[in-house]
Amino acid sequence: LGDRIPAILTAHYAGQETGTAAAEIIFGDTNPSGKLTLSWPRSVGHLPAHYSQQQSSQIFDYVDSRRDAVYPFGHGLSYTTFEYGALQMSAAAIHPGDIIEATVRVANTGQRAGTEIAQLYVTGETFAIARPSLELKGFRRVSLEPGQSQEVVFQIKADDLSFHDASLNRGLPAGKYLVRVGGASAELGEPRTLTTRAEPRSNPLIASAVVTSPHSGVPHSGVPHSGVPHS
């Protein structure tokens, strides 16, 4: 269906004002900013289709179809366009108890004011236990006028990167994560490497993400991957 029409408007239990909200979006009075909180499969045969599958499950396509979702987790259209700059990290390594910052500049490159939901994902590598191909670790909402740009700051807590080992002990083992930011799970920028250290620092790094712009939207940072429902 998506190959034949330019956009699909979907709403799940949107309430008694569904008609008003839909009309305002269709006629352009409101610029939509919603993002999918699930991965939309191509068919029932593609289930499960959640974005955070193990990397070993994403090697082969189906015989008669691609393996990826038709609309990926975090996807959503707008009447304007956004562009992401290069991701910057406040530290190259993170230890237990640390809180570091990831910063990216987001610009509204279209002709209308709009709101973007920037999303931060990590990919764990070199760990004894395999990690999902992607894990959402934070998101921030930023509202921008045409031509305006703003730095968006995420907090990454060491505890957000911890996981259980084979003995069900939760901790942060030595290894590395690839950190990416973008407007959807399938639209991410170049990764930055974040090394994890198992031993704590004598003085943990504590960063404080503060956004002062009046168009920063709803402050939100350092959200674990459960902050947005998975499919």
Image (cartoon, rainbow, N blue to C red):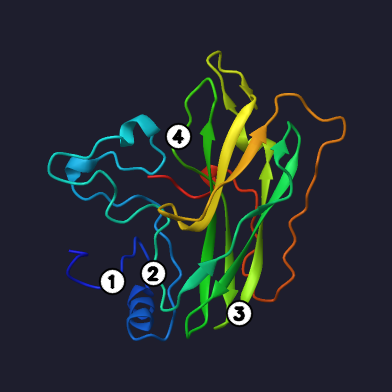
The residues tagged by marks 1 and 4 sit, at their Cα atoms, a distance apart of 30 Å
- Is label 3 in a helix, a strand or a loop? loop
Residue for badge 3: 148
- Is label 2 in a helix, a strand or a loop? loop
- The answer to whether the residue labelled 3 contacts the one labelled 4, judged by CB atoms less than 8 Å apart, is no
Residue in view at x 47 percent, y 85 percent: 111
Between discs 1 and 2, the one toward the N terminus:
1
Q: Quadrant of the C terminus?
A: top left
Residue for badge 1: 7
Q: Is residue 58 left or right of residue 43?
A: right
Tell me which corner region of the image, top left, top right, bottom left or bottom right, holds residue 93.
Answer: top right
What is the residue that sits farthest to the top in this orientation? 167
Residue for badge 4: 132
Please tell me whether residue 134 is drawn above or below residue 130 in the rendered image. Answer: below
Between discs 1 and 4, the one toward the N terminus:
1
The answer to whether residue 54 is visible is: no
